[in-house]
Amino acid sequence: MVTPLPPAEAASPAEPPVPPEGRVVLDARDIARALTRISHEILERNKGSEGLVLLGIPTRGVGLARRIAARIAETEGADVPVGSLDITLYRDDLRKHPARGPQPTELPPGGIDGRTVVLVDDVLYSGRTVRAALDAMGDLGRPDAVRLAVLVDRGHRELPIRADHVGKNLPSARSERVMVRLEETDGQEGVWIS
């Protein structure tokens, strides 16, 4: 089992979090339904949970991967290993954008060699984050197959990358912002576009 990552500090109960500006695209119930559907799709495509590993891309991808693993456990009665995969040093835009501090990369016991790895992230946009994740994973092992599950696919791909499992396809303009907030990292739950 993966060493649990420390939870992000939630907003204090005295001060409810302020939702982002913009239109609500998914509320908490929509997110729960989307993750349940993604979980079932993963099981169907893999023909069960045998050999699966879920790797969340920090920050919100880790929480989503844990939620998907919990749903798979409810359905299959088997635990799916969950880990996190930091891509900070593999990004190709470090010169353009200030880098955040590296996050932990934690592989489940047994690693990823010979397994089916499902990368989990919150938003798929240009595809550059996924490319960085593939590069990072290449330094850690050689899975049999790699798939991608995202909560939101907003389009505008710059690389030939496609998600295998999508919670919501969200056509958007490049000038718009898509904001995902999860209870465990942000103290609120939803997806907004502005």
Image: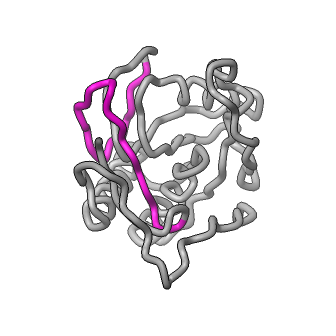
Viewer-closest of 20 and 72: 20
Quadrant holding the N terminus? bottom right
Would you say residue 20 sits in the magenta stretch? no
Q: Is residue 104 above or below residue 147?
A: below
Q: Which image quadrant is residue 122 in?
A: top left
**Is residue 83 among the parts visible in the rendering?**
yes
Q: Position of residue 9 (x, y in %)?
A: 62, 69
Q: Position of residue 135 (x, y in %)?
A: 67, 24
Q: Position of residue 48 (x, y in %)?
A: 43, 54
Q: Position of residue 30 (x, y in %)?
A: 25, 60
Identified at 43% across, 15% down, the residue is 158
Viewer-closest of 57 and 54: 57
Find the residue positioned furthest to the bottom.
14
Q: What's drawn in magenta, residue-wise?
A: 161-184
Viewer-closest of 175 and 119: 175
Identified at 27% across, 49% down, the residue is 22
Identified at 65% across, 52% down, the residue is 83
Q: Is residue 40 above or below residue 4?
A: above
Give left or right: position of 73 versus 154: right
**Is residue 53 among the parts visible in the rendering?**
no
Would you say residue 180 sits in the magenta stretch? yes
Give left or right: position of 137 versus 38: right
Quadrant holding the C terminus? top left
